[in-house]
């Protein structure tokens, strides 16, 4: 896998730079915004994920000899542009919603202020990371709330691309999952990993009993035994006979789960395995998790649904130029006017408004001097908080947003931000955003 991220982009990003260098507009100070016009899947809120990955990727956005030779051989850009790319280092400013934060239509999740050439080069990279990771995190957040505090493990690696699986595990962890089956995610991001055995392990042995005996011999009685390869009730009985009443857990991967779970819990208790936990892993999504939350299930394993965004694999985010300086050094707002694809021009700051009980009531977008501006009036300052934070300053990534510390902070931030939302945000039905977006 290449260490440079410079080619994780589209051809036309480079041809735009090439043409802008030729016309003399490449170095115009510009502001780009990454946002979603609407919440895909009619979700009530979105979750920002992938910010730390994006910042790390920007740090590796370099055109080395191999990248430059590829461009030269295919005559994609002029020699003058190749020289500019050879020296490329992002030197601008980036503000954004910190990872784990919630967002709504129009929320400027990433604001890039730099030359046009530097900013436009980041478009595809930023969108590819945040669109996918935020879709996973949004689905994972809904599942975590539906679980009512019971732990969820991400186990969907085989249902997506091999590197997408690692990113998905990270995004799910940020949004409330407690573990992953993916070892690379554990190594790369410090996420707790879990897993024991699949049906093939049971089928390998001459009997279910022999399979359980082999697993317990290797992993101890605190392991999780998969009891539905043949007959679930007999599987439970055999599991307790082999491991004893201190058996850690049984896993169920099939059947009418509410009925099966109730029967398994009853049977475990009758056999004296009152502390043995039940985990379920049968094509779960937020709706089935919600249906099982009040049952005697102790934990959930979710695969396909979480890594594919539970039917919404992308958040539909876009990256648009919203302002640039003219030849006199004055800021000019620009915006796309196409039907159903209009954007709001201008530099913006963002505050989230709250009622007296601390519940969010609106996302306030202020047109003006951009991030970090003062709120208009002490009353607004007391009843709202600023959402945007600096991510990159003069080309330098803020360290608190990356690495294991960044993930831990994002996970805690997400927990706090979701708690601020009104109850309607937790609805699993399609509907309007939980709070409105207001431009001022």
Image (spheres, rainbow, N blue to C red):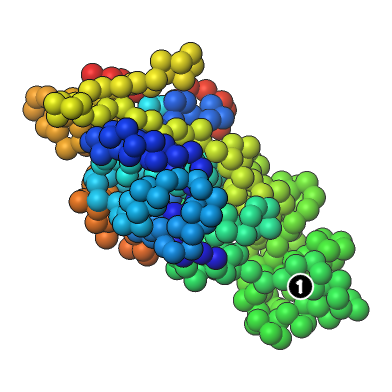
Q: Is residue 237 left or right of residue 349?
A: right
Query: Is residue 251 visible in the rendered structure shown here?
Result: yes
Q: Is residue 159 left or right of residue 361?
A: right
Query: Is residue 246 visible in the rendered structure shown here?
Result: no
> Is label 1 in a helix, a strand or a loop?
helix
Asked if residue 380 is positioned above or below residue 418 in the image, the reply reads above
Q: Position of residue 399 (x, y in %)?
A: 27, 60
- What residue appears at the point 51 percent right and 33 percent down from the top-left corner? 316
- What residue appears at the point 39 percent right and 20 percent down from the top-left corner? 336
Mark 1 surroundings within 10 Å by alpha-carbon count, few (fewer than 14), some (14 through 19), many (20 or more): many
Q: Position of residue 308 (x, y in %)?
A: 61, 45
Q: Position of residue 398 (x, y in %)?
A: 25, 56
- What residue appears at the point 35 percent right and 54 percent down from the top-left corner? 83
Q: Is residue 86 left or right of residue 246?
A: left
The residue singled out by tag 1 in the image is: 239
Residue at the extreme right: 206
């Amino acid at each position: 896998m290449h260490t440079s991220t410079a080619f994780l982009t589209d051809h036309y990003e480079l041809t735009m730079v090439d043409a802008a260098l030729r016309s003399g507009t490449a170095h115009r100070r510009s502001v780009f915004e990454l946002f979603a016009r609407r919440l895909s899947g009619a979700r009530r809120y979105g979750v920002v994920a992938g910010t730390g990955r994006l910042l790390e990727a920007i740090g590796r956005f370099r055109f080395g000899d191999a990248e430059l030779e590829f461009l030269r051989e295919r005559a994609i850009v002029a020699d003058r542009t190749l020289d500019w790319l050879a020296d490329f280092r992002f030197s601008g400013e980036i503000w954004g919603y910190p990872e784990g934060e919630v967002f709504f239509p129009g929320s400027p999740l990433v604001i890039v202020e730099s030359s046009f050439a530097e900013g436009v080069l980041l478009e595809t990279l930023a969108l590819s990371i945040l669109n996918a990771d935020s879709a996973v995190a949004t689905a994972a957040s809904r599942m975590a709330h539906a679980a009512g505090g019971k732990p969820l493990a991400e186990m969907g690696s085989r249902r997506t691309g091999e590197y997408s699986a690692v990113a998905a595990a990270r995004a799910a962890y940020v949004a409330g999952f407690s573990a992953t089956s993916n070892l690379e995610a554990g190594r790369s991001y410090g996420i707790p990993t879990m897993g024991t055995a699949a049906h093939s392990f049971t089928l390998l042995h001459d009997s279910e009993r022999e399979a359980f005996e082999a697993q317990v011999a290797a992993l101890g009685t605190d392991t999780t035994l998969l009891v539905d390869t043949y007959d679930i009730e007999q599987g439970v009985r055999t599991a307790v006979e082999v491991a004893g009443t201190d058996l850690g857990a049984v896993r169920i991967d099939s059947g009418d789960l509410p009925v099966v779970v109730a029967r398994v819990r009853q049977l475990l208790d009758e056999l004296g395995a009152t502390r043995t936990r039940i985990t379920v892993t049968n094509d779960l999504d937020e709706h089935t998790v919600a249906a099982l939350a009040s049952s005697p299930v102790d934990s959930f394993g979710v695969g396909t649904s979480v890594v594919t965004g539970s039917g919404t694999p992308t958040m539909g985010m876009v990256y648009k130029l919203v302002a640039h300086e003219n030849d006199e050094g004055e800021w000019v707002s620009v915006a796309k006017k196409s039907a159903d694809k209009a954007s709001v021009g201008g530099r913006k700051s963002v505050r989230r408004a709250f009622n007296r009980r601390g519940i969010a009531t609106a996302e306030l977008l202020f047109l003006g001097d951009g991030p970090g501006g003062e709120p208009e009036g002490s009353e607004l300052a007391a009843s709202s908080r600023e959402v945007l934070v600096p991510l990159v300053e003069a080309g330098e990534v803020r360290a608190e947003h990356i690495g294991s510390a960044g993930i831990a902070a994002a996970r805690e931030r997400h927990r706090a931000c979701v708690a601020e939302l009104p109850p309607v945000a937790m609805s699993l039905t399609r509907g309007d955003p939980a709070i409105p977006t207001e431009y001022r």
